Amino acid sequence: MKLLIALLSIGLAFHDVAAFSTQRSSFRPRSSLSMNVEVNSAAKTIKVGVIGMGRIGLVHLEAITKAPGVVPVIVSNPTISKAEAAALQYNIPKFTNDAMDVINDPEVDAVWICSPSQYHAEQIKAAAAAKKHVFCEKPIATDLAETVEAINACNEAGVKLMIGLQRRFDQNFERVKKAVERKEVGEPIMIKLCSRDPAPPPASYVKGGGGIFADMAVHDLDMSRFLAGADPIDILAIGSTHIDKTIANFEGSEKYDTASCIVRYPGGVQAMIDVCRQSSFGYDQRAEVLGTKGMIQTDNVYPNTAKIFKQDYTGNADMPFDFFLSRYNEAYVTETIKFCESLVNDTPVPCTGTDGLIALIMAIAADKSAAENRWVNFNEIVTEVYCASPTQCELIAQDSMFPDGFKPSSKAEDLLLPDVDQVKAGKGIGAKLKEWFAV
């Protein structure tokens, strides 16, 4: 925490937009977004702060400004000019270059964390300590123990935590999910997912980014679980390098620009995933579920439906969307609206800390499988986490001497305290804490 505060407090500045003559009108445009809000004249307005005014932060901020019952009151960005510009554009009264100003603002009920990934866990913990609800873009952390700590900090504090795995909120993937739930194609047999970027990122981005499974395939791994409607059993993964040979000597799965996985689910359901950092024909994002009574697919999304018919070519007039933000803009907006609904109506969040944790466990297992050339059971990853308390965890290798009383967990949920919504449903924290420390 000290390191985080030191990093974010450099050049500390805090401003009230009202002090600027360039402040825009207080008029807020009528929302064009659909949001389910229970009619309650006594319901309080949820005031929120947003950390990070980069591309994703601005998408979330714009959605928040159009959501009924939710009002942004402060934004932050280390480059304060970006925070100021956002505050002026969206008529937000305060801006700062310090994330802790957002977290500790007494007006703020909930915090959107859209900062660089390395700050997520500490900011989540700080928000939980301040009793603020949290929306955080994935990942919670790239370290498994730190991920567990951050989730438990929120669960112990009794605040909501939603993780931004935006593909769950894409209308195309949602339709496939509904088909599975409604048994439109019968019982699922096989799930296929492919994710291919239009161009590889620079080597500087890849190095230290966690590898192709944690950085890229994690979305597809999570989507396979989302569509299967069950927790996975084990995984087999491989990787290779074809496009950018400069990364071939990087550590672990950072050296791969291409990878494939097979994930096994209960009942023999298989999920096959392929990812690649380059697709010359655009952003390739497709899904397919084969069932006992049929199949459902979702294809790439194009900017328009125009087609060209010529002697030498018949097909779409334009390429698919070539960037994740244009492809999934609506999904990012939808996930923000869903969290706003949860806050205003006090209903369970649709993508929990547990979902974020399991997605990370799947990515770590894929990395281990590719490195060791074998099937890896997801429980292997879970059993390496030792928690002296719900918010003090570390990783212990399988061959290490376990502390007295240590009971390796058999599944991800065993590492976590019940979240605030589970507690309201009758799963008390007190009972879980007694179980946690039972020898």
Image: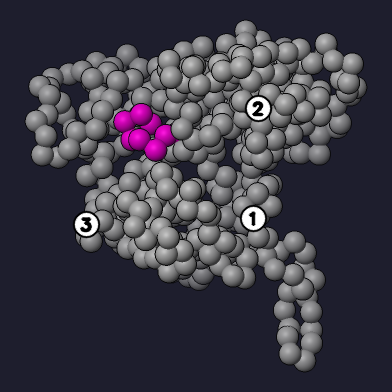
Distance between mark 2 and mark 3 Cα atoms: 43 Å
x and y percentages locating residue 246 in the rendered image: 42, 60
Q: Is tag 1's residue or tag 2's residue first in the polypeptide sequence?
A: 2
Please tell me whether residue 143 belongs to the stretch shown in magenta: yes
Circle 3 residue:
372
Mark 3 crowd level (few <14, some 14–19, many ≥20, 10 Å Cα): few
Q: Amino acid at mark 1?
A: Phe
Q: Amino acid at mark 2?
A: Thr
Assign a secondary structure to mark 1. Answer: loop
Assign a secondary structure to mark 3. Answer: helix
Q: In which quadrant will I find the N terminus?
A: top left
Assign a secondary structure to mark 2. Answer: loop
Q: Which mark is residue 79?
A: 2
Above or below, 209 against 201 in this view is above
Q: Is tag 2's residue or tag 3's residue first in the polypeptide sequence?
A: 2
Q: State whether residue 337 appears in this view.
A: no
Above or below, 393 against 332 in this view is above
Circle 1 residue:
323
Q: Amino acid at mark 3?
A: Glu
**Could you tell me which residue is drawn at 55 percent across and 16 percent down?**
9
Q: Which residues are magenta?
A: 140-147
Please, which residue is most extreme toward the top here?
106
